[in-house]
Amino acid sequence: MPKTALRRKPEKASKLGKLPEWDLSDLYSGLDSPQIKADLDQADRDCEAFEARFKGRLAGLAAGEGAGRALAEAVKQYEGIDDRLGRLISYASLVYAGNTTDPDRAKFYGDVQERITAASLHLLFFTLELNRVPDEQLDAAMGDPALGHYRPWIEDVRKEKPYQLEDRIEELFHEKSVTGYSAWNRSFDETIAGLRFKVDGKLLAIEPTLNLLQDADGKKRKAAAEALARTFKENLRPFALITNTLAKDKEISDRWRGFKDIADARHLSNRVESEVVDALVAAVRAAYPKLSHRYYALKAKWFCKKRLPYWDRNAPLPKVAQRTIPWTDARATVLTAYGAFSPRMAEVADRFFVRNWIDAPVRPGKQPGAFAHPTVPSAHPYVLLNYMGRPRDVMTLAHELGHGVHQVLAAPNGPLMAPTPLTLAETASVFGEMLTFRKLLAETTDKKQRKAMLVAKVEDMINTVVRQIAFYSFERKVHSERRNGELTADKICELWMSVQGESLGPAIELKPGYETFWAYIPHFVHSPFYVYAYAFGDCLVNSLYAVYEKSASGFAERYLAMLSAGGTKHHSELLAPFGLDARDPKFWDGGLNVVAHLIDELEEL
């Protein structure tokens, strides 16, 4: 990226104050760092040596004397290699996210990805052989504390056993991933980042254009929506090709591995039972009338309309002053809310500000949206934002810092057991949002501002629960239809409109152009069926927060202990101390009722 582009400031920059840019030197000093080449070369040697030492020997080690210690040594070496490889790809992906249109960064990311794929091919045998060890031998070996330490990881690996293939096929799948789904992911990212949307004579990237959908000026909202629709329509062919290719790629993998349902692979990686997800989806869809349908009818009345055009769905309330929130205020708001809940939580979150672990400005080519990247336990997480000073941006900061705190607390479990299934990962982020919202609401006495805050929260909850379940329903339709042949762009648009109409209800007018809005959703490309994790997390947090409000003491300690467990426990174990069980179908109704009660309060206001 040219240096002049790096200095370019978004609109309202002076009002926002100085926005932080992350310092990635805790991983590597730069793209030309000699340590990168040294670590890539060392990773090659370590992977080859690991294969030479252990391939074909795990069955013998498990059956021999001192099996627990011998297998534990192998797992420990595997874990160390995993950390080095994770550090390399984390750095490459973060650099790339900073500007996906920079050819030098794109090449660097692609080259590192290829090197790591080639090196890790030598590790592929390990989990496959581990799963061929008889259960009774592995259970006996885990009686040794050295191997018993890794029991949660080993038990997760064993859950993959029914779906693993013959070694050579696994190697082929692994090696071709670089030219398969990973390449299509990258194509999507670079296409989206390169799009420009003409609004009132100005060419804007996607993030500031989407931001205009929340502008106080209705003409700007309409102009932005039409610009998005126009540009998406002009580019539907590549997006349809990406969607078709990835859906077919997934169908091939699922068929070879023996997954029965199109979402079973995601459920397995989330360590959640399909019946739990089915119960969640059914509960949310049944609640559409009392949530989104009712809320949008209410919002239409506030705008003195029978129906709202889709570009007004997230419009701010009329006659309510729109605030631009400086970065320092956003930081203080979130840390104060976190600190009121737990000083420890605030202390961990504050590290992200003090140590430059956050990249906040909007820049040309920067990946849109927001994320918290855990990197590796030997380093620390990083947070990417596109901060523009909206109240919603403060909630996004609280959301991503929730992830970040979770990742820091889980890191001591090590590279293999720190990662958390998506369902529980979203719990930490949404809980961070809820803390921030409740703190602000309690301090707000002005009736108009209180109403505006409730509106923002209800809309966020609808976007997190209703919208994400509609996304999940859309994905199910796309992947199911794809099994009958390639889908035209028009067919994908038709499927999109069918779930959007059902979820948003009659008060939202889905005008021509909206049928293309599936094209920019990254989750469909990067993580098929990821989206239900947001609804899972939101409903779970609603139930958790209800327990917190009724709890005399000790809740914060139990909550932080849950986060610190990382991936070492199933969701049923983690929720048991709070008296919650996601397997109970009624559990989801409790979480959804929290949203309904907030809408009740808005009706009264």
Image (cartoon, rainbow, N blue to C red):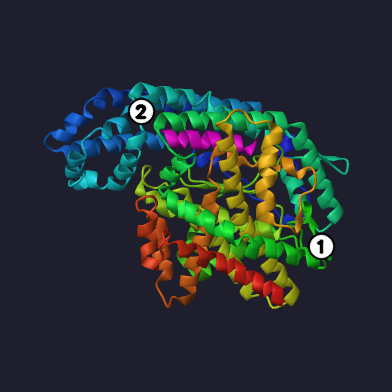
Asked whether 577 or 322 is in front, the reply is 577
User: Going by the picture, which residue comes out furthest to the left?
Assistant: 65
Please rate how many residues cluster around mark 2, counting C-alpha atoms within 10 Å: few if below 14, some from 14 to 19, many from 20. some
Q: Quick check: can you spot residue 2?
A: no
Looking at the rendered structure, the kind of residue marked 1 is Lys
Residue mark closest to the camera, 1 vs 2: 1
Residue corresponding to mark 2: 165
Q: Which residues are magenta?
A: 85-102
> For residue 364, which quarter of the picture?
top right
Image quarter where the C terminus lies is bottom right
The one of 166 and 278 positioned closer to us in this rendering? 278
Which three-letter amino acid code belongs to the residue tagged 2?
A: Leu
- Residue at (50% x, 28% y) in the render: 113
Mark 1 residue crowding within 10 angstroms, few (<14) / some (14–19) / many (20+): some
In primary-sequence order, the first of circles 1 and 2 is 2
Q: Is residue 101 magenta?
A: yes
Residue 17 in view: yes
Q: Residue at x 26, y 48 (%)?
A: 149
Question: Is residue 436 rendered magenta in the image?
Answer: no
Spot occupied by residue 153 in the image (x, y as percentages of width and height): 32, 44
Where residue 178 appears, as percent x and y from the top left, is: 51, 25
Q: Residue at x 11, y 36 (%)?
A: 65
Residue drawn at x 48%, y 28% is 252
Instruction: Give the residue at the far right of this rendering.
Output: 201
CA gap between label 1 and label 2 equals: 56 Å
Q: Main secondary structure of the magenta part?
A: helix
- Frontmost residue, 570 versus 471: 471
Looking at the rendered image, the quarter that the N terminus falls into is: top right
Where does the image place residue 2, in percent across and percent down from the top left? 71, 32
- The residue to which callout 1 is attached is 306
